[in-house]
Each structure stands twice: as structure tokens, then as C-alpha cells.
Amino acid sequence: MKLIRLYRWKSRLVLAAAPVLLLCAGCRQDMQNQPKIIPQRGSDFFADHRGARPQVMDTVARGQLHADSYFYTGVVPGPNGAREEKDEMPFPVTMEVLKRGQERFNIYCTPCHSRVGNGLGEIVMRGYKPAANFHDQVRRAQPLSHYFFVMTHGYGAMPDYSAQVTPVDRWCIAAYMRALQLSQAASLEDVPAGMPVRHLKEIAAEEGHPEWARPWTLPATAVQAYPHTNEGTPAMAPGNPADPAIRIPPGKPAVAAQK
């Protein structure tokens, strides 16, 4: 009788322990040896032994359908395959757009260009190459998409900001830059009838800061590639020869088909 009872007790113990053993074995298989694809590692599952799979031909991933080419590039097709900039926004400019552009401009652009866009930002005052003055004649004549193109690709000492600033924010900044230019290049004819107009010198004198109405000067530590001129420029920035205009290389003309 004792042997029978001992046998039954062992049988029950084995039956009770079996699920636990199976659970442990399953966890080890699922948690330690996971059948997953690890980035940049090979795989025996695919014929080419590449774990990272290429994008399927003739498909567009979610969020990558850039149907509006001008919105994402700032250029449009021109004659003979050339790419041209345009002086227009890809969407309507509202007060919200200008406020967003001002916010992004103050974050990313003012260290070099200053809050008024005259190219004398804080890092320029500490020895960096003077940035572009948005209020000189050359920059005021440039189309809006030119600013988007420069923010996207960079130019000269300026790096590109495509990783930091989204396309829509780059357009918002461009719109705000145009508003800055209008604020510095406005004339008395642009003021609505009945609105009072005061000179900056009067306001500066009343506030006790006459230096506000004086031209700004560069420190001796600033790196300047061009000699200064004696001509004054808007926004009280030093007068310097304008940088060469950024020109987008035209595409090659189409080759006529051979007969």
C-alpha cells in the first residue's frame, strides 16, 4: 500500500511540475532567442541574407508622398530643365503663420542674424563671420523661396537647418523675414491716414538711449571677408558688398532623339 501511495504521489508531482517546466522553456525560447530582425544584421530567412529590407519598388511610404514639389524644395521646373525660385508662399499667410515664423526665427536665426535681421547676432559680436543683412538691396530683391532654399541646403558659413526646422516652419520663417524687411523699408506712403509717425531718434532720446538710433559697429574680433564701405544700410548694419547671389545650376538641355 505504501508503494502504491508513493507512486501516486510522485505521479501527481510530475503532473503538477510539467506545466511549470513547459512555461519556463517557452519563456526562454520567446525572451532569449527571439525570431526578430535586428538592425544592420544579416538574416538567413531572406535569400539575399539582408535583415534590413529595401523599400518595395513603385511604392511610397506613409508620410513620404511629397506631391507638392514646390512646398518641399522651394523651386519649380524652368525652361531646359532649369530650376527656378518663386516669390510666393505655397499656402496663405495669416497672423498665426507670422507668429510661428517669428518664434522659429527667434530660436534658430537670431544667434547670427539678430532679431531685426541685420546680420549682427550675438555670436557675430563674439567673433563669428557677419551673417547676411536681410535689409540690404540684394536680399530684399530675392524671392521668398530663396530663403527656404538656403535654410534647407545652407550657404557659405551657414549650415542647413533641414533637420532642425520642418518644411512648413521654414516657410513660416521666410514669411516673417519678409515682414521684417517691410518693417525696415516702409515709407510714409505706407502708413494709413491719420496714424502718427515718429522718428526713431525722438523715441531713443525720450527713452534715454540715443545709441538706439546710431549705426551699429562690428567688434574687432569679428571675421569680415569684405572691406567696409561708407554707405549706410537699413537696420543700422555696417555697409558691405553683398554676397554673391545664390544661383541654382540649370539642368542640362534635353538631347534630341536620334533618327
Image (cartoon, rainbow, N blue to C red):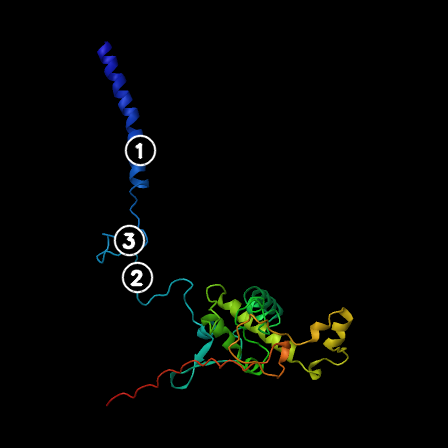
Name the kind of residue labelled 2 in the image: Pro
Label disc, if present, on residue 98 of the rendered structure = none
Query: What is the C-alpha distance between the residues marked 3 and 1?
Result: 28 Å
Point out residue 228 in the picture as x, y percentages from the top left corner: 57, 80
Point out residue 132 in the picture as x, y percentages from the top left corner: 54, 75
Which circle's residue, 3 or 1, is located before the other in the chain? 1
Residue picked out by circle 2:
54
Q: As drawn, which residue projects farthest toward the bottom?
A: 259
Point out residue 108 in the picture as x, y percentages from the top left corner: 54, 65
Is 103 located above or below residue 182 in the figure?
above
> Which of 112/137 is in front?
112
User: Foreground mark, 3 or 1?
Assistant: 3
Residue picked out by circle 3:
41
- Give the residue at x 74% y 76%: 201
- In which quadrant of the rendered view does residue 190 lie? bottom right
- Give the residue at x 55% y 71%: 222
Check if mark 3's residue and mark 1's residue have beta carbons within 8 Å.
Answer: no
Query: What is the C-alpha distance between the residues marked 2 and 3?
Result: 14 Å
Residue 17 visible in rendering:
yes
Residue picked out by circle 1:
24
Which circle's residue, 2 or 3, is located before the other in the chain? 3
> Which of 23/80 is in front?
80
Local secondary structure at mark 2: loop
Name the kind of residue labelled 1 in the image: Cys
> Which of 32/187 is in front?
187
Q: Quadrant of the C terminus?
A: bottom left
Local secondary structure at mark 1: helix
